[in-house]
Image (cartoon, rainbow, N blue to C red):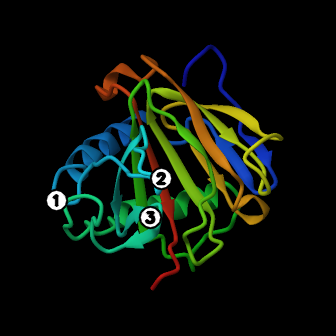
Amino acid sequence: MNGLFPRARQDIAPGAVHVPDWLPLPGQLALVEACREWAKAPAGLREVLTPGGGRMSARQFGLGRHWTPRGYTRTAVDGDGAPVKPMPHRLADLARRAVAATGFGAADGCAYDVALINYYDDAAHMGMHQDRDEQTDAPVVSLSLGDSCTFRFGNTETRTKPYNDVELQSGDLFVFGGPSRLAFHGVPRIHAGTAPPELGLSGRLNITLRVSGLG
């Protein structure tokens, strides 16, 4: 928690909830250390190529399934071609707890089977996009680690306004589902040097947990 007063939970839009300081520091540290291991080859951290031939400034790897702008695969088709690492039970359990904590229910029937983990250095950003490669409407769970960011959460029709800019700090939880499940969202800015020093992390890790619905 940064600042003198606790930050309050916010309903950013119908079905979109921000819970500050949801994951305590020991849990953050454990996830950072786990991400360092998961990000190693094979099927480790890599640059993502866009359909137009560019490269995303945030680097990424997947657990459970590999993601490219063309959808999900079982192997790192735009990386080293290796099979993707399995989805850890600890992350699936974390997703279910997060969904329950934000009022979407216990999520017992939701098999969270994909983790997409993005690493942002201080110059990285993410354009407005929808998470629409899943064959399910289960809520998306997002956990922030390291440097704070400006998270832009928009509407379901367009990449432009109306949208809300939310500061996500290390340990914050953001869940969106229901009428906001296909809302456009992005990260226009990373706030360098704001990570808790105990994490030993420069930049931001974003762990996004999803139900693929792909069987």
Q: Secondary structure at mark 3?
A: helix
Q: Which residue type carries mark 2? A: Gly
Q: Nearer the viewer, mark 3 or mark 1?
A: 1
Above or below, 159 against 2 in this view is below
Q: Earlier in the sequence, mark 2 or mark 3?
A: 2
x and y percentages locating residue 16 in the rendered image: 72, 51
Q: Earlier in the sequence, mark 3 or mark 1?
A: 1
Q: How many marks?
A: 3
Q: Are marks 2 and 3 in contact (CB under 8 Å)?
A: no
In the picture of the structure, the residue carrying the numbered disc 2 is 52
Q: Secondary structure at mark 2?
A: loop
- How far apart marks 3 and 1 lie (CA) works out to 25 Å
Q: Secondary structure at mark 1?
A: loop
x and y percentages locating residue 69 in the rendered image: 47, 61
- Graded by Cα atoms within 10 Å as few (under 14), some (14 to 19) or many (20 or more), the crowding at tag 1 reads some
Mark number, residue 42:
1
In the picture of the structure, the residue carrying the numbered disc 3 is 93
Above or below, 165 against 69 in this view is above
Left or right position of 76 against 106: left
Q: Which residue type carries mark 1? A: Pro
Q: Nearer the viewer, residue 179 or 80?
A: 80
